[in-house]
Amino acid sequence: MKPKLIFYFVFLFSFTLEVKAQQDSALKAYYKYRKLYVHDLSHKINVSGLIVGAGNGFELRSKQNIRLRPNETGNIGLRFTHQWLTIGLSLRIKNLNPERRGTTNFLNIVANSYGKKWGGDAYYLSYKGHYITNSYVADLPQFLDSNTYPILPNLNTVYSGINGYYIFNHQKYSYRASFIRNEIQRKSAGSFLMMMSYSYFKLSSDTGFIPSSVIQNFLPESRINSGKFNSVSIMPGYAHTFVFAKNYFFTLSPSIGLMTQFQNYTINGLTVKGVQKGGSVIYPRGMARAALGYNSKKWYCGISAIVDNYIIQLPENDLLIYNIGNANIYAGFRIDVPKKLKRLSKKIDEYSPQHIIDEIIK
């Protein structure tokens, strides 16, 4: 080997070692400083019992408003969290008062991933069977006499989507401490967030969803029989956790932005694409998360909630608004990983979405 090649090889090898040493030093400094604000307990297994109450539904706003909801009460479940991975088992609570509100068949699949820097949600919610909650409809004689709500058993809705977000001040702030409780926020702190998302909303009904007794109050352009709505959003936001009495916390995290929406819906057999000829519109979108609870090294309890709001613009300033939301009441404790599962624990950490994203960015 020529002397010059040897020199270049030694220089490149030394340079690589120096860069690696600087990266390791910066990473050690990062975690040393982060420990002042966040106590990481993701190496343990969180075991949580929870009650989930749902708040999904949609509303048509015209000369008069009409609100529709599935008869979905919620779930009782057990959740296991380790590192970034959460696995849950749940038992569906039966439809309440099916004689008054009808019966809803539904399928709910929700996945969450909360990292130190990155996070995301994915969901698929399908419902068949809705009832109308407006008193001016429900108080009509035919419904008062039978003591029932107006029921639409053949109204189908599907909500699905993906949210991804980045936490800017991840050195001081933990989103995980409030929403999956595998970290503890030691001091009050906050962070700006940047969220991007894709969502899909579909509704269909053989007879529409406006009762004939009040259909004259809605413009012909708003009497939708079926529709598909795809939305792409970008939403800046901010999250802040207030820590008090050492282990108690309150978190508020609103995000507000804009979404581009592609509309395709049917009115009396005629297909309409958007409010204008192009088939797409831009409209505001808002989302909020909140949490209140107690979080210590051994156990935790509290309540958390999420509300996601979508606005669909129709002709003549009418609006179709749908909401995706739930509230969780939870209590749980932490245990060490059994020795037989420690190798699996390392693999789970190795394949975390945050590590994969960081590697792609590098």
Image (cartoon, rainbow, N blue to C red):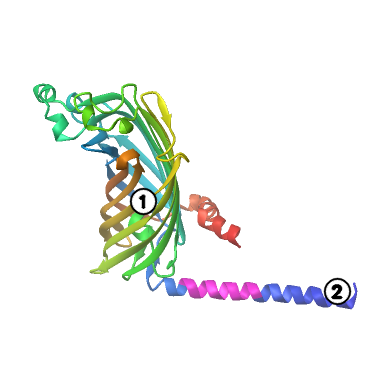
Q: Does residue 319 appear in this view?
A: no
Look at the numbered disc 2 and give the secondary structure of its residue.
helix
Is 27 within the magenta?
Answer: yes
Q: Secondary structure at mark 1?
A: strand
At x 22%, y 38%, the residue is 63
Q: Is residue 299 above or below residue 206?
A: below
The residue positioned 34% from the left and 52% from the top of the image is: 287
Residue 36 visible in this rendered orientation of the protein: yes
Is 59 placed left or right of 116 in the picture? Answer: left
Tell me what residue is drawn at x 44 percent, y 35 percent. 273
The one nearer the camera, 143 or 294, is 143
Question: What range is drawn magenta here?
Answer: 19-31
Say left or right for 307 vs 273.
left
Question: In the rendering, at what x and y percent does residue 357 appear?
Answer: 55, 56
- Image quarter of the N terminus: bottom right
Image quadrant holding the C terminus, namely: bottom right
Q: Amino acid at mark 2?
A: Leu
Q: Is residue 308 left or right of residue 133?
A: right
List the residue tagged with mark 1. Answer: 285
Q: Is 94 on the left or on the right of 260, as rendered?
A: left
Badge 1 density bin: few <14, some 14–19, many ≥20, Cα 10 Å: some
For label 2, the crowd category at 10 Å Cα-Cα, with few meaning under 14, some 14 to 19 and many 20 or more, is few
Instruction: Report the magenta stretch's main SS.
Output: helix
In-front residue for pair 168/315: 315
Rendered location of residue 103, percent (x, y): 26, 26
Q: Which residue is mark 2?
A: 5
Judge whether 154 appears above or below 64 on screen.
Answer: above
